Image (cartoon, helix red, strand yellow):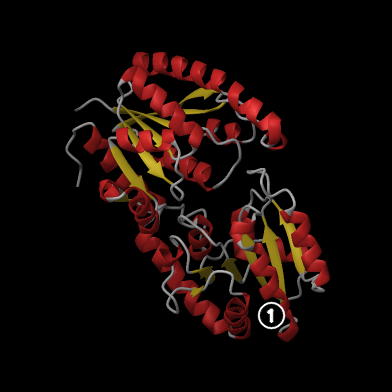
Amino acid sequence: MADKIKVLLLDTNDAFGGVVRGHTMFLRITDRARFEMYAAVLGHGAVLPRFLEIPNVTFWKIEVGTKPAQWCVGWRGRLVEAWSVVPLAWTALRLAVLCRRAGIQLIHSSDKKRSLLLVLLLHKLTGIPYLYHIHNNYIDYPANRQALERASLIFANSGEMRRDFIHWLGPTMERIRVVYNGMDAERFRPGLPSTLRQELGAAPDDVLIGISSRLAPDKGQETFLQAAALVIAQEPRARFVVVGDDAIFSDNADYVPMLRKMAAEKGLAGRVHFLGFRSDMSNIYPGLDILVNAAWREAFGLVVVEAMACAKPVVGTQAGGIPEIITHGQDGFLFPVRDAHRLAELLLDLVRQPELRQRLGVAARQTVLDRFTIQRQVRDHEALYEELVGRPMKT
């Protein structure tokens, strides 16, 4: 039997978002008979414990010059940015030694800037090939162009992201593969118990409509609240739930106060609930009747798939990878970006027709089982790993 392929996964995230969720799920179920998994993760913060609880993975704690959100702007931001080169360089040297000792054969990097800088240094120091995993739209800066140029394999989480990179960089990016994100269809499934309605004091006939994502302008919570006001004017049974916070980025500090002010001005007090960040989404989705994704840009939309797995109808924008997940009228609905009136029309149909919610939810669950399970994503990743090290792929 061939020796196991030794893979290092780089994760430089300092907040728990979709990429971290994907990495933790992936590490849990990668075939340990064929792959020996290593992961380099930040040695501080809320993300670390989520990784350390995963069995049979060797973790290397790293520091890459992360900084508090309030230090990301002005002269302090420039100073800290310059200083961050020191821990990044030291981490690269240390990881290079660890990779050589462990016999790492390939590195799996996300498109986060710190990860790309680190993987470029590691590649230069060790020559180990790496995979570039696209999670978001292309951003033009030298390290990104170099990372794409030198990557042995590039894959994206949606066809839209592949098209975005081809648009900006031309035909050389046609080598990008598409591997859709997957989710745990056992953790997110129909019929799970939920305490959400009790938490909110919802009446039995209230219809709960939720949105869950980082709170930021491009995620469309403003459109969600505009639609909420239109829906409630006609259907007072509707109640709206906003899940998420603004902890990941520093450029939207005024957005959350604006959302709360907007809700108050539209007379939505008591009908819109801001829940903040929640780690219990397997409790939240089952308590909702409908989920909305109102993002202007969405590389994939893991929240969409998770809610669909719980047999919840999802109304999402015609943006990014969402139309690759939802088939309009079959397993969910799609609406134009920023179109609060169209969103409200679709929500009113769903509020008034429980049988429509039921039909779309059943179809949504089947779509996930057919196309978006974590098992399918892991199989695709494993095939890429075997291709990269020159091993025949298992069928």
Badge 1: how crowded within 10 Å, few (<14), some, or many (20+)?
many
User: Toward which corner of the image does residue 56 lie, by quadrant?
Assistant: top left
Q: Is residue 257 rendered to the left or right of residue 394?
A: right
- For the point 64% across and 35% down, the residue is 46
Question: Percent from the top left, x then y, of residue 28?
Answer: 44, 39
- For the point 24% across and 25% down, the residue is 3
Q: Is residue 122 visible?
A: yes
Q: Residue furthest left?
A: 392
Of 386 and 220, nearer the camera is 220
Question: Percent from the top left, x then y, of residue 58?
Answer: 45, 24
- For the point 69% across and 61% down, the residue is 242
Of 22 and 337, nearer the camera is 337
Q: Residue furthest front?
A: 75
Of 308 and 316, nearer the camera is 316
Q: Mark 1: which amino acid? A: Val
Q: Is residue 194 rendered to the left or right of residue 393?
A: right
Question: Percent from the top left, x then y, of residue 303?
Answer: 53, 58
The residue under label 1 is 231
Element carrying mark 1: helix
> In the rendered view, would you say 232 is above or below 376?
below
Q: Is residue 324 rendered to the left or right of residue 5?
A: right
Question: Percent from the top left, x then y, of residue 309?
Answer: 48, 62
> In the rendered view, would you say 207 is above or below 143?
below
Picture mark count? 1
Q: Is residue 11 visible?
A: no
Of 108 and 370, nearer the camera is 108
Quarter of the figure that contains the N terminus: top left
